[in-house]
Amino acid sequence: MKTEAVVLRTHGGPEVLTRETLDLPAPGPRELLVRVHAVALNHLDLWVRSGLPGLKLTYPHRLGSDIAGEIEAVGPGVRTGYVGERVLVNPGISCGVCERCLSGCDNLCRRYQILGEHVSGGYGRHVVVPDANILPLPGNLSFVEGAALPLVFLTAWQMLVLKGRVQPGQTVLIHGASGGVSTAAIQIAKLFGARVLAVTSNASKAEGVRALGADEVIVRSTHDFVDETKRLTGGRGADLIVDHVGGDVLTRSVLAAAWGGRIVTCGATAGVSSQIDLRHLFFRQIEILGSTMGPKGALWTILDFVRAGKLRAVVHSSFSLWQAADAHRELESGNVFGKVVLEVA
C-alpha cells in the first residue's frame, strides 16, 4: 500500500525532513498495520536526524519512537489487538526468543532496536509493528497524550524503580527537570514516596516542576546544584540521582550523592565524556548505573497508574506531522516543558 510520511534521506538540520509518498508492505506474520494519529518527539529524533556515529539506516528513514493510533489491519497469526482498537506502540523491538527476552529483560536483547532509531518509526500515516509491541490506549487519554508516554516513562521507570530501587523517604535528585524523562521521573519518585529535588535551567520552569510534585527546585543558572543538594539534605547528599545530561553534570553528581547512593544515567545531551575521581566511588560506595529504555512489561504497569490518575503525560505543544521541521526547531530551542507531539490527520 502507499502512505504519506515525513522522511530523511540525508543527515543535517530540520530542513532535511521532507514529505513523501512511500510504499509500505502489508503486515506479515504476527504484525499489525497501525494508522498513526500522533507521534511524539524525543531528543533521539534530533540525534538520528543529525547523524549518530555507527548508526546504519535504510533510506528513506522515518523518525518517531512514540506512536498512538488505531489498528487498521492484522497479519497472519496475530495474538492480540483487533481492527479499530485504539493502541499505543511500545518503542522497543527485540527477538522475543532469547534468554533475556524470555526473562523479561528484552531491552538487554542483543538484537534490541528502537523504532525511529534503528528501524523506521512513526513519522507517517501508517506503521507496521510486531503484535508484541501493542498495548490498549487508556480510554481517558487522547492520542496526543498517549503518544507522550511510552519512551520517557519506560526510561524513567527503569531508572528509578528497576535500577535505582527508589524507596519511601529517600531523596532523589533529578536533572533537566523540564525534559520528558525528568517530568516522568518526578512523578514516579513521588509515587514511591520519595523527596524530590529537581534541577532546572531557569526560574521560569520552576512553577511547572513544582506542580508535578517536586519538593524543592534548584535553578542551575543561579545556584550550584551540589551545594544546594548538600544544604537541602543537611550535608548528607541525594540517595538517588537521575541524569540524562552527562558531561560535567555527571562528574559533579558524584559529589552530590550520599554515601552508598546511586546515580542512574540514560543520556549525554551535554557531553559524552566525564572525568570522575574513582576514590569517591569506592570509598563512599557510590554506584553509577547505565540505563536504556525498559522491559516491555513495565509499560503495562505504568499504564495502570495512568488509568488511575497517578501518572500523567506532560505535553508542551503539538504540531501537524507536516510541520515536523518546526517541531524539531522548537525542541532544539531548549524552551520546552514536557513533550512535543506531532498530530497525523
Image (tube, rainbow, N blue to C red):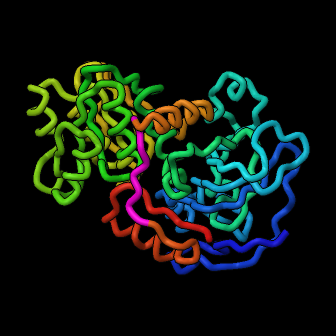
Near-viewer residue (119 or 73):
73
Image mark count: 0
Q: x%, y% of residue 210? A: 22, 45
Magenta span covers which residues?
A: 310-317
50 relative position to 29: left or right? left
Name the quarter where the C terminus is drawn: bottom right
Please say whether residue 233 is visible from this viewpoint: yes
Please tell me which residue is depicted at 40% across the width and 26% down the height of the picture. 164
Q: Main secondary structure of the magenta part?
A: loop
Task: Kindly identify the residue that appears in the image at 62 percent across and 28 percent down.
Answer: 105
Q: Is residue 120 magenta?
A: no
| 113 sits left or right of 243 in the view | right
Q: Quadrant of the N terminus?
A: bottom right
Q: Residue at x 58, y 61 (%)?
A: 38
Q: Is residue 193 above or below residue 340?
A: above
**Residue 284 seen by the camera:** no
In the rendered structure, the answer to whether residue 35 lies left or right of residue 171 reads right
Identity of the residue furthest to the right in this view: 76
Image position of 345 with respect to 214: above or below: below
Look at 81% across and 36% down and name the residue there: 79
Asked which quadrant contains residue 73, the reply is bottom right
